Image (spheres, coloured by chain):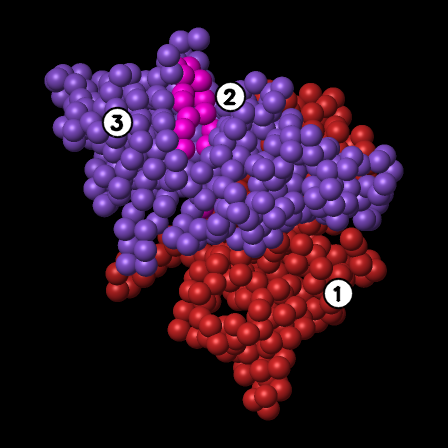
Amino acid sequence: MSEPLLSVEDLRVSFHTDDGVVHAVDGISYSVRTGKTLGIVGESGSGKSVSSLTTLGLTRTQGGRIEGRMMFEGRDLVTLPDDQMRRIRGNEIAMIFQDPLSSLHPFYKVGAQLTEAVLAHRDVSKKTARNRAVELLELVGIPDPRRRVDQYPHEFSGGMRQRVMIGMALANEPKLLIADEPTTALDVTVQAQILALLEDLQDRLGMAIIIITHDLGVVAAIADEIAVMYAGRIVEHASTEQIFGAPQHPYTWGLLKSIPRLDSPRGEELVPIAGRPPSLIHRPSGCHFSPRCPYVQDACKRVDPRLAPVPDQPGQAVACLLEPAVRSQIWQGLKDGRESDTLRELASTGAPLRAGASTPTTSEAGP
Amino acid sequence: MTVSDGTPLIEVRNLIKHFPIKRGVVIQHKVGAVKAVDDISFDVARGETLGIVGETGCGKSTTARLLCRLLDPSSGTIIFEGEDIAQRKGDDLKALRREMQMIFQDPYSSLNPRKSVGSIIADPFVIHGLHKNEGERKKRVQQLMDRVGLNPEHYNRYPHEFSGGQRQRIGVARAIALEPKVLVADEPVSALDVSIQAQVLNLLRALQREMGLTLIFIAHDLSVVRHMCDRVAVMYLGKVVELAPSQALYSYPRHPYTGALLSAVPVPDPTTARHQRQLLTGDVPSPANPPSACRFHTRCPKAQELCSKDEPPLEDKGGATVAACHYPLSREEVAKNLPMALSAAAEA
């Protein structure tokens, strides 16, 4: 297999605050290959955005302490001097943010903002840059680009603004595109359009994409690999098929079972994850997820599990102390809708479930 | 999950809300109107959960605020328990607040940061002069806190000391303090983290069962609405375009807009997620200047000439579904574009 385009090794990012040290990213490793899409999933405060802002050197200025390595085509982005970083940012690595309204300058026409992105990295005439701006608007599917290029951001709808942002990010044909919650602020029909656009652009331009989101539905549609983050760590990393087909971490189960789905039986009881994400200053001892984990064992409160390969599942890694056989049984039990007490017992004894040991909870009221 | 006995508790007829667009600095004159809610009619049965879904600008939040009378309707009637409440004012309106309460989307801006949680939840009692005895009031507030899953000892804490999910629980406690008959929840979980959403949804369902509440649940997330609601109204640009029992709506949508909405929902399953989505082109048009006749015809994949000339009425399309469409979706089209709708139908 070819060399990865970006390879992150044991990245740690922490911030000093008056309340203490915030360990926003705590030793994560991942890699992305050209033409592939990595999805990073997590809740607010899981460190998913900080890790990608660091890729662009955007946490340096905020007093962040950054350790580890981020190799991008032979250069380490962690130690790269600022002037060289500036040449990569927006050129070889580009980013799309969540809120297209606050990411576009309201005083400047979108054309001016697009040409700026081109001129920042290319020694071309203004006219060429402007033609490029029109080309970019056309590329991202904005109708009538020659007229629209002279309009202001407020004249665009939310979905159109996000298209402009994508156009701007693609101005210099980046090798890596980082999309931080690119569709969260958009309506579902527009979200579907933007996701289709990203896929189409990847096919045509062959770039690598890192998509950061809290929505498992979004990554299911477009990611090749998924990293699930919790409290600054990657707790599970696997192919998209594995994450949805045979997830291994109790947090991933929680995410999958706590959202209502269009394709699940109606009336199925949701299984929320109890409690709330931990503070990144005072993290729980042992496994950071242990205070919220329904299957917690004594060892989980003492031992901090590291991400380790899952036997018989090539490419899948999980940070969990439960036995692999027990984990797959619990997941099967969750899918069958077994009582949570039965599953908890299974976690502590490791005894296999007998068929029919408990009644599956089906919909409480029939259709 | 239904505790409905079928009699309508609320009857909405020809409800309209237009917000004027004004020009001029000193002397203002009206130059147009945002037709946020434009002639909608529906019933809400006692004890049921009615979902209202739609995209930004479809008028779903305005409808919620009109029902609670936080906004004055431009015209139309809202019959609540046999009485028209659309024009109520003053003390009559205040009395209505004991019957209907609202939960808001943003748990950060809907709680006064300078008041303690105890006094926020006690506010309805102060306003309506209930539980005048200090000790009794405190006891009642602590009962409410306990009921919604908050620690009653946190009575004296301030909103900033709580997480988003807990704040939403404070909002719920405040809304049920007066034991209303109707609870209108406007996007109650969309600002919350995914792992927290289920906690609040389960709480709302439990409260509904216990208190026999009628719940009007407004959301843009179709999966959440399907989970929560008995019946669902789909709105587009100020109009109700389809209204049907959940089971029917999700297994056999009739309006092409409902079909497109369902097709656009990301499903957390890579095999179904990668099916050919039926993509709508363009954005929602402005409600200040909506398209003529059928408002969806500019984006509709099935639009014909008739759709831009004649406005389709909201009419019976069979199976308890009403939809406003000249060319409703057929079973074949649903089967082709919405594979998960089929699986939902199969288990019915």
Q: Relative to residue A68, is residue A171 depicted above or below? A: above
Same chain, labels 3 and 2: yes
Q: Mark 3–mark 2 contact, CB under 8 Å?
A: no
B207 and B86: which one is in front? B207
Cα distance in 3D space between marks 3 and 2: 24 Å
Which structural element holds mark 2? loop
Q: Which residue is mark 2?
A: A224
Q: Nearer the viewer, mark 3 or mark 2?
A: 3
Same chain, labels 1 and 3: no
- x and y, in percent, of residue A259 in the image: 62, 42
Q: Check the residue under mark 3 and report the chain it is in.
A: A
Q: Does residue B300 appear left or right of residue B322 in this picture?
A: left
Q: Which residue is mark 3?
A: A77
> Furthest residue to the bottom?
B133
Q: Mark 2–mark 1 contact, CB under 8 Å?
A: no
Amino acid type of the residue tagged 3 in the rendering = Leu
Work out whether mark 3 precedes mark 2 in sequence or the reverse, and give the earlier one. 3
Cα distance in 3D space between marks 1 and 3: 57 Å
- x and y, in percent, of residue A325 in the image: 69, 30
> Furthest residue to the top?
A1
A57 and B260: which one is in front? A57
Q: Does residue B247 appear left or right of residue A357 in this picture?
A: left
Q: Which chain is red?
A: B
The colour chain A appears in is: purple
> Start and end of the magenta stretch?
A28-44
Residue that appears at 12% across and 17% down: A123
Residue B210, labelled with which disc?
Answer: 1
Q: Check the residue under mark 1 and report the chain it is in.
A: B
Dot 1 surroundings within 10 Å: few (below 14), some, or many (20 or more)? few
Could you say which quadrant of the image residue A26 lies in? top left
